[in-house]
Amino acid sequence: MVGTLLVVIFMIALLVTSFQGFTSDRNSNTQQPTEGTDYDFTTYSSPDCGCCGQFVNYLRDLGYSVNSQKANSYRNQFVAAGVPEDMYSCHISFIDGYYVVGHVPIEAIIHLLNTKPAIDGISLPGMPTGSPGMGGIKSEEFIIYSINNGEVQEFFRI
């Protein structure tokens, strides 16, 4: 009886975990095809950060090439790029002359690459639940900001 109960609990936990991953993907719109997968990303993050690896996997699953650099000095990339501290997240990526800070959904990145605005980069500050690589269920609109010479403006909403 106890053995059967443990098997049932394990199966329920497995189903819940699988369902959470599906809802996270659905809420981040990763099921939609993307454009421009010929672009290459270089991403810098802490060696200990698991969600950064999930974000890299998100990009790779969409067909992008990602050079993932893990180093304790990854924050130096934020400083060198001129990212304001209130726009920091747990990783920074570089693509086609722009930087992308944090768990930015692909729709905003595609918009950046298609419109090619005169900015330095974009950021989804913090680590919002339901964003690509973070897991969980998206519960609010994501506001992605553009940054140009340290000036921050709203860029895209998802």
Image (tube, grey):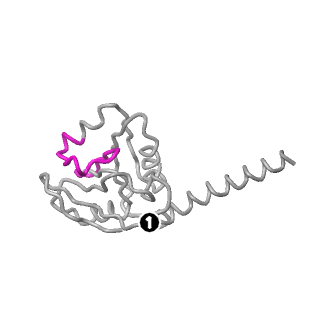
Residue 157 in the image: state x and y as whole percent.
Answer: 31, 68
Left or right side of 14 for 62: left
Residue 143 in the image: state x and y as whole percent.
Answer: 30, 64
- Callout 1 environment at 10 Å: few (<14), some (14 to 19), or many (20+)? few
Outermost residue on the top side: it is 72
The magenta stretch spans which residues?
Answer: 78-98
Left or right side of 47 for 88: left
Question: Residue at 54% across / 63% down in the picture?
Answer: 23
Query: Does the stretch in magenta take in 116?
Result: no
Residue carrying label 1: 139
Query: Does the stretch in magenta take in 86?
Result: yes
* Towards the viewer: 44 or 40: 44
**Above/below status of 109 relative to 82:** below
* Towards the viewer: 135 or 58: 135
Residue 134 in the image: state x and y as whole percent.
Answer: 45, 52
Question: Residue at 30% across / 50% down in the picture?
Answer: 101
Question: Residue at 43% across / 52% down in the picture?
Answer: 59
Q: Amino acid at mark 1?
A: Ser
